[in-house]
Image (tube, rainbow, N blue to C red):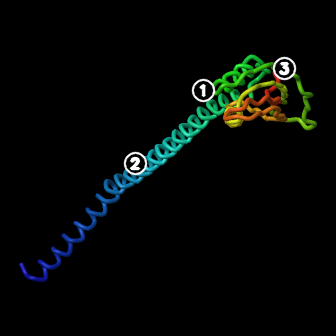
Amino acid sequence: MRASTKRFYSILLGIAFFAGAMYVYSNYARSAYDKVKVLKGERAAKIRLLDESQKAVEIVDTLLAKYQSLSSLQDSISRALPVGEEIPAILNQIQGLASLDGRKMEIDSISFQYLPIEYPKEKTFLRPYGAIRVSARMRSNYADLKSFLSALQKNIRLLDISSLKIDGGGKGSDPALTFDLAVDAYYQLKN
């Protein structure tokens, strides 16, 4: 065989291989490539769905944590501003604070008076609140009085000291004082 014939056959064989490669590519590789593209798209969609689901779970967890803290906030608000007057609780708190930390305070008299309730003029979701004025006549020394007033201020229930009148006070190292105290205790109205 001559060299030119060999060249011609090798070119023909190259063209046949090229045509075969094109046939294999168009029939097998391209369909497999299309399947791979579809699978990659499905994988990307599933990854995106997983990420969105994880974000949604995180948001729900955050909201649950907020609502749980809101329920503890609701409990704190209910202790600071209870629903209903709870007069025995007010009396108990005043008597407890008077004897707390070794204070030597005597309560001579105590009385309660409902203060007028002012309803909001605009519609609101908040409950209206009222106040009870607690008037007490007490005796103690100055240090215990000062400590008692500080404890009233730090008490969990909302209490305002509306008036304080101090009488007495003699000579000596620990003179007894008589004082009249008026405290407003606030509460939420029941529906």
Of the image marks 2 and 1, the number of the one nearer the N terminus: 2
Amino acid type indicated by mark 3: Ser
The N terminus is located in which quarter?
bottom left
Residue drawn where x is 90% and y is 29% of the image: 117
> Can you say whether 134 is above or below 56 in the image?
above
Amino acid type indicated by mark 2: Leu
The residue wearing badge 1 is: 102
Of the image marks 2 and 3, the number of the one nearer the N terminus: 2
The C terminus is located in which quarter?
top right
Label 3 CA crowd tier, 10 Å (few <14, some 14–19, many 20+): few
Nearer to me, 71 or 60: 71
Query: Quadrant of residue 77 in the image?
Result: top right
Q: Position of residue 80 (x, y in %)?
A: 71, 30
Q: Position of residue 131 (x, y in %)?
A: 84, 28
Element at label 3: strand
Amino acid type indicated by mark 1: Gly
Nearer to me, 101 or 155: 101
Please state which of the two labelled residues, at mark 2 or mark 3, is closer to the viewer: 3
Residue drawn where x is 75% and y is 21% of the image: 107
Element at label 1: helix
Query: Quadrant of residue 137 in the image?
Result: top right
Q: Position of residue 148 (x, y in %)?
A: 69, 32
The residue wearing badge 3 is: 111
Q: CA distance from mark 2 to mark 1?
A: 78 Å
Q: Which mark is residue 39?
A: 2
Of the image marks 3 and 1, the number of the one nearer the N terminus: 1
Q: Position of residue 189 (x, y in %)?
A: 82, 24
**Which residue is farthest front?**
171
Q: Classify residue 34 as left or right of residue 53.
A: left
